[in-house]
Image (cartoon, grey):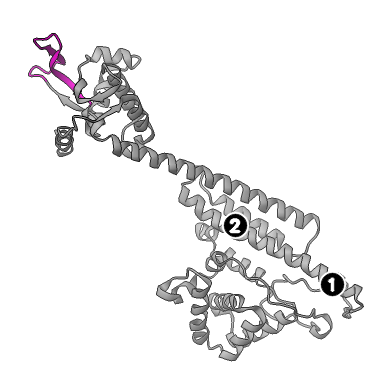
Amino acid sequence: MTLGMLASQESASKVDPDASVDKWKIFRALCEAKDIIGVSDRALAVLNALLTFYPKNEIAEANGFVVFPSNEQLSLRTHGMAGTTLRRNLAMLVEAGLIIRRDSPNGKRFARRNGGGGLGEAFGFSIAPLLVRAREIEAQAARVMADRLEWKRLRERLTLCRRDIVKLIEIALEEEIAGEWIEMQKHFNLLSASLPRRPSAAEMESLLGDLEALREMIVKTLELKTKTEKTDANDGQNGRHIHNSNPHPISELEPSFEPKQGAKPEEEARPWREPPKSFPLAMVVQACPEIVAYGPGGGIGSWRDLMAAAVIVRSTLGVSPSAYQEACDIMGPENAATVIACILERGGHINSAGGYLRDLSRRAERGEFSLGPMLMALMRANGPAARKTG
């Protein structure tokens, strides 16, 4: 006897005389919620056998609560379960508060007939807790089923996202579109390898966020390339030709943290037309975790939070207001804040943050700089796959 068993007996004594529940319906709910309640499959097999001895389908006070089969009878209805295993699983059902022992003075299970020929006092196992806890068990079963559906939904989204990324990278490689496609492919493989064989919903949701951010980055890169090609084609048709001795113009996604030696921006520049779209906020925070501490309340949940944090970091790094305003005008406020976050992350490699930001702004104005490679490099350094291997 334990305090938990005493509590179960106390609650079972407070049965609503008008309450009833279908024994097989509550048993199915128990099978769904068995991990939460803490019973094994074999214990449920024993409970199933006990319920077959209950004379009615509806568990109710009017039908009584006690069943009194012998161990031999239970063994037969559990397909020959051994006596020791049977007793162990009966004890598990008692400890879980699903049945209550009603022992006779000699420990036997039996029932006495009353004067009218019906059952009087009975000794065995009371299944009253199933009636008392019916709502609780059904709620737990509903929760388990909802969690299972959510797990399945996440798995499907994860599968589709992975398929999209693989196909997009394959298209980019087949069409020989400029970009860091091999690096993106390696990053995708590292992310995929970080998923356990039997992942939880939280693990899948975390990976899904990373993969969706990567997919959005790939889509933006392809859209930018398509838009650039259309613009170049229109300029050619209108007779506006920019002299370039190199037949392959500088890629908008060329990864670099310093200006290229010997470059001639006056000749190779492409006119800046509009600030590019920002990358996903989740990707920025993943690539640049250090800026999170500067957000309002020590966290970043929106672009407004990131831009507020960038203003503080700008001052900390010694970047002048004019240099930051210039970056906002050219790149857009979201991308300028993202660049500040990247500079903070690589602070030890940059001598003058203000001068570096002005240089990036000039390159962005000429169409020679994109955030994609910078974020990819930092994601490889700070992403979940890197943290796992580190």
State the image coordinates of residue 233 (x, y, percent, origin top left).
87, 70
Residue 292 shown in magenta = no
Q: Which residues are magenta?
A: 104-127
- Are there few (<14), some (14-19), or many (20+) residues within 10 Å of tag 1? some
The residue pinned by badge 2 equals: 212
The residue pinned by badge 1 equals: 232
State the image coordinates of residue 191 (x, y, percent, origin top left).
58, 54
Q: Residue furthest front?
A: 18
The residue type indicated by label 1 comes to: Asp
State the image coordinates of residue 176 (x, y, percent, origin top left).
80, 59
Side (left or right) of 10 relative to 159: left
Side (left or right) of 386 relative to 112: right
Which residue shows up at 58% across the image and 49% down it? Answer: 158
Query: SS of the residue at dot 1?
Result: helix
Task: Report whether residue 157 is seen.
Answer: yes
Image quadrant in which the N terminus is located: top left
Query: SS of the residue at dot 2?
Result: helix
